[in-house]
Amino acid sequence: MAKRATCGAPDWEIYERLVAHMLAQQSETDLCVTPNAHIVGRITGVRRQIDVLIEARHDTDNSRRIIVDAKKRSRKVDVKEVESFRGLMEDVGATHGYLVSPVGYTKAAERRAQSAVSIRIVTLDRLEGFDPSTWPQCRKKGCEHGRVFWDGYPELSVLLHPVDGSAPITVSSLHYVGKCDRCGRFHVWCLACNDILAPTEDEDDCGHHCSCKPLWFWLASIEEDEDGYRSAELHVCLATGQVGTVDRRSL
């Protein structure tokens, strides 16, 4: 049975969330990070679990897809694990991958990794004081243990032109956007009114406003690229008619 950390989750899961948190802090703003992602393999047709997925935030361009395998084990990453990971990368169309371990890797594993795979060490002392149970609970009904992983911070602005001809006024607000670390549902946290919204990808979902009634609303949808690959996307719809994608996760 898996050992459990103080927050109630298995310690391997806490390690995965730590790695996701660290990567989200280090990633460029045009990349989004999804913990515990699931993608249907292009070769196998099987739904594959990925500890951490990194991909383009604002469009369905999957050419920059990176996957991460966080291995909380007492032994070093070996060559067989690198080979298995490379097979996963090929199946889900990842251009690069990270194998993360608290104790390192063998020389053979390092040689087998080559340029497409990087092997990193994240020691267990980094877990001290890290507690994902403090993250907000998922708003989806029935997702009892899901926690919201924030990975983006879009600042929204709308330029208003008063009818009396006076100077234009800029209305802006800062938000957090992210996903549940269990079910993947999108969440938006408005820092102006402190509301947390949870848009769904249902076709009949007409959008979500927070209590401060800004000049935009949030909408989630399922999109498909030219190659037939699907992704869930979180959009912000501005009063000007502009629509922007602020978060996504491949399916």
Image (cartoon, grey):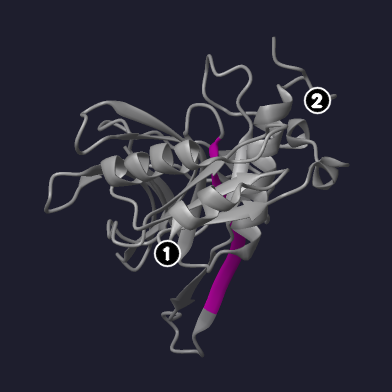
* Numbered range of the magenta stretch: 170-180
Residue flagged by tag 1: what amino acid is it? Ser
Residue 93 in the image, given as x and y percentages of width and height:
28, 49
Which three-letter amino acid code belongs to the residue tagged 2? Cys
Q: Where is mark 2, residue-wise? A: 7
Camera-side residue of 144 and 85 = 85
Residue 21 screen position, x and y as percent? 66, 49
Q: Answer whether residue 213 is visible to the viewer in this image.
A: no
In the image, what residue occupies the spot 56% across and 64% down?
A: 27
- The answer to whether the residues at label 2 and label 1 have Cβ atoms under 8 Å apart is no
Q: Which residue is mark 1?
A: 115
Q: Is residue 134 visible?
A: yes
For marks 2 and 1 on the same chain, the one whose residue lies earlier in the sequence: 2
Q: Residue furthest top?
A: 1
Residue 146 is situated, as x and y percent measured from the top left of the image, at 60, 26
The quarter of the image holding the C terminus is top left
* Residue furthest to the front: 108
Residue at 73% from the left image edge and 27% from the top image edge: 11
- In the image, 114 versus 196, the foreground residue is 114
Which SS does the magenta portion mostly show?
strand
Please tell me how crowded label 2 is: few (under 14), some (14-19), or many (20+) other residues with Cα within 10 Å: few
On the picture, is 173 further left or further right than 223? Answer: right
Q: Is residue 219 left or right of residue 26?
A: left
